[in-house]
Image (spheres, rainbow, N blue to C red):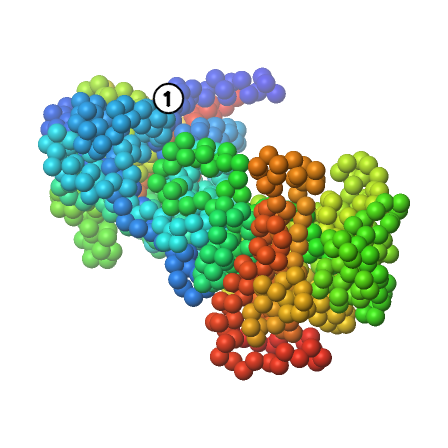
Amino acid sequence: MQLRDFYNDKETTQARIPMLQVSIILGFLLLLAGLWRVQILRHNYYSTLAEQNQIRSIRWVAPRGKILDRYGRPLANSRRSYTLSVTRKDLSELESSLDLLTEGLRFEPGYLKSQIEKQRRRPRYLPLVLKEDAGIGDISFIEAHRQELPAIQVVPHPIRNYPEDEVAAHLLGYVTEISENQLESGMFGDTAKPGDIVGQKGVERVYDHILRGVDGEKMVRVDSRGREIETIRMVPPLAGDNLSLTIDIDIQRAAEKAFGDRAGAAVAVDPRTGEVLCLLSRPAFDPNSFATRISRQKWDQLLLDPHKPMQNRAIQSRFPPGSVFKIFLAVAGLQEGVLTPTHTEHCSGSTQIYGRRFACWKKEGHGEVDLHRAIVSSCNVFFYRLGRKLGIDKIAVHAKAMGLGYKTGIDLLGEDPGVIPSPEWKRRIYNANWYPGETISVAIGQGAVSLTPIQLARALGGLGMGGVYNVPHVVPSEDLSRAGRRLPAAFKPDPPLEPRTVRLVSQGLWGVVNEYGTGRRAAVQGFDVCGKTGTAQVISRESRERLTSEGKPFEDNAWFVGFAPRDLPEIAAAVFVEQGGSGGASAAPVLQAMFQVYFDKHKKKQPLNGAGSEHISFSLPSERVN
Amino acid sequence: MPKQILPYLKQCDWVLLSLALAIAAVGVAEIYSATQYELSETFYVKQIYYIILGLVVLALVVSLDYRLLSQQVPYIYLVAVLSLLLVLFIAPAIHGTRGWIPLGAFKIQPAEFAKVAIVLTLARFLSENRTHFLTSGEIIKASLLVGLPLGLILLQPDLGSAVTLAPPLAVGLVLGGLRRRWILAGAVLVALITAAGWYSLKPYQKERVYTFLEPERDPRGQGYQAIQSRIAMGSGGLLGKGVTQGSQTALGFLPERHTDFIFSVVGEELGFAGSFVILAFYFLIIMRAIRIAQTARDKLGVFLVLGAVSVLFFHILVNVGMVVGLAPITGIPLPLLSYGGSSMLTTFMLLGLIINVGMRRYIY
């Protein structure tokens, strides 16, 4: 019974299968007819359309976000420019008009050919760039010769512009087209494409993901003469976001001006927050020169320049701090209790330690000196003896507790950690023993100790703050999270600085500037500037004398570091001048220029605190003054 | 063990499988050609992985007797419906529709797998009918079984994928014993639903139909694809421009050229000759499958094969029809040729079902 049913049912189904077969055959015949119509009958018609499908896809470059200073003034923006280019497809058309172009666009003979050759390796859909940032003359030439030059496209293209030219060049960085290596490494994210303009160095590099927009695309149909007939598709670009920095362009300009042509670096920070107010490095480069395709020659020139203009000396270079280091020795002595304010040493111009004679800079000697006088007059002998008493290990511990010898964590790339030497360090690096005499050199900031300007600016501000070391940053903390970063908490060493230590050392630094010290040229009337000069020997005395006699005078490196006002510091800075001679003469005026601008802006109209030196409070400010 | 497997392997339709792999190989070449200037992804390499994965899935489907497979139908159906529900809640909306569940490095498109589930479910349901003709209750039950997942796909909204569930129902009902007057009534009903559906179409869907009827109406938007597709195909002529030589393809005038419009790349680069051969291969696959249905040992096998055939044929008809300008633009991929993992796996599952039934025609 069941069997019969099964076959019967199957027959119903099987009987209807031919119906399905016929439908399917009809369906395929219909498709075949469609194919025949499009590919055979109308082949000529569609071929013509394909030929006329002169559709050009033009990259619609997104403008990069502006970089602004803390008051919204532009440090980097975009300017409109025009690029002359030609698509690969139209290249053959161009070959015949190379001479005309060379003449009309005022190229060197042969330049165009080499330019085309050079760009052959780039992906095929990228247009060949003939001339970037074309002038009005170039554009009118192209338009006037449209008949002969139908393939040339004039494409508007925003170009990065740095209105302040070289000012803060190292801080800002520059932009170029993404390199093949960068593209492969994926360092600019998955969406980066060949031809993208990306940030290199500085803020442009670190915050590239904020500043860079998303390029759009414009598809246009052009006629056989290269004129746009209609726009087929438009994907507008997304502009990059603007980015405000903590930099005050007024302070930056003042520092640049005071620096003149000398090489070196200057950094100013707000010690209460870690905000960087000014960051300069000299010699500088003009970031505008990278915005258009920079020539190989020019690039090599920048890279091979013995003065290293591409190096950001404020964070990437370390130098012996010279007498500046005495500040940290004084702190170590007071913290360790080996030094009291009343303790005195006799300076006769030199001293014998470990059987060797160590000289003071003042040949006739300072006589009896206590801590205050030792800081103010920068007496070497006092600090030689203090260094011996402390020993290298304790010096290192206290210097490191003030953030020296470590990267500060500033939001820029390539920061150098500096060196705070110790016997352990010397064994690790040189596999050699520490000589006691080296401790004495380190005590006055010579020998292996070497620090970066940003480290010193932070350490001085942190000292003035009573031992709170904020991490320097160039983007305001409230914007950092938007950039996917987090500001590390301020560094507070344990055990903390004793208020007495801070008071005594600050008082000494105040004296350097405001009493009979070496830093009088850093004084700002009514601002209680505290500071310390430093002079670091670069080469031996003999070499220097030899060079001088050969007519190539070689000066020492000069430092000036400081903060102000003494009681509740709002600004701290470090200035380094390569071969500046003495710190008081060459570096102090730069710091003074920065502090003066700050003072004029924030303090002038406010009632001044008495310059009293007796009552000093070290509570942290509860609100920002500016 | 090998002795037991050997006769089955002899019965495996190797010709059908070879035809399918030949089409897939052409697909890889054309995907390479269509995306050669895309730097972000190497689509053709991924497609090769999908094909290999598809073969593994096919082997799995083939190794299980289809009668055992049909016992799992309630679970398969449940999983399909649940995943379609899931997609509505967790899938991210892309271009206003949600159809993809991101799963690690992969994206899964449950609507694709729903096609297989429906073929299995209908085959089981219809094969359990013991009478000559279907009762109205059975017709309604079958319609509801298909209607639930179809409705869920419509909610994504993905009209194209939803419509692909209708052909197995139609074919299943007609061949399962729908009375002639019901077939007639069904035709009328379809016409009415089409009319009613027109009023419920979203504006962009209506626009698609308009531009299908008259592509020049909107040469920049919807019509743009239709025109560009035909220009690419038509300029291919009899013999085509050769693989990687298609200018329309290379210049990127054709959107979706490696997925839904892959057949126009075939048309441009391999010409009428190439597209004819591809169509002939599809035709042979389907005819062989129908031959398997005619010789199947039981009703379940017949309905499994015919269900799979109806899904595959509908895809080919609508996709190629769209490319040559006979059907409106819908997001329906071309089996074996279009780039895409979910579509590739679904196709191999359906082919696996067909081969499965063919292998077990005789009892050993």
At horizontal 48% and vertical 48% (from top left) the residue drawn is: A261
Indicate the position of residue A614 as horizontal and vertical percent values: 71, 79
Callout count = 1
Of the 4 image quadrants, the one containing the N terminus of chain A is top left
In the picture provided, is B7 more to the left or to the right than A382? left
Q: Between residues A37 and A297, which one lies in front from this camera angle?
A: A297
In the picture provided, is A332 more to the left or to the right than A319? right
Indicate the position of residue A163 as horizontal and vertical percent values: 36, 54
Q: Which chain carries label 1?
A: B
In the picture provided, is A510 more to the left or to the right than A380? left
At horizontal 65% and vertical 39% (from top left) the residue drawn is: A544
Q: Hey, which residue is sitting farthest right in the picture?
A: A355
Indicate the position of residue A571 as horizontal and vertical percent values: 57, 66
- List the residue tagged with mark 1: B22
At horizontal 50% and vertical 76% (from top left) the residue drawn is: A604
Res A201 seen here? yes
Name the quadrant containing residue A370. Answer: bottom right
A626 relative to B258, above or below: below
Q: Between residues A115 and A302, which one lies in front from this camera angle?
A: A302
In the picture provided, is A603 more to the left or to the right than A390? left
At horizontal 66% and vertical 39% (from top left) the residue drawn is: A545
B169 relative to B280, above or below: below
Q: What residue type is labelled 1?
A: Ala
Task: Determine the secondary structure under disc 1.
Answer: helix
Q: Between residues A186 and A261, which one lies in front from this camera angle?
A: A261
Name the quadrant containing residue B236. Answer: top left
Indicate the position of residue B306 as horizontal and vertical percent values: 35, 34
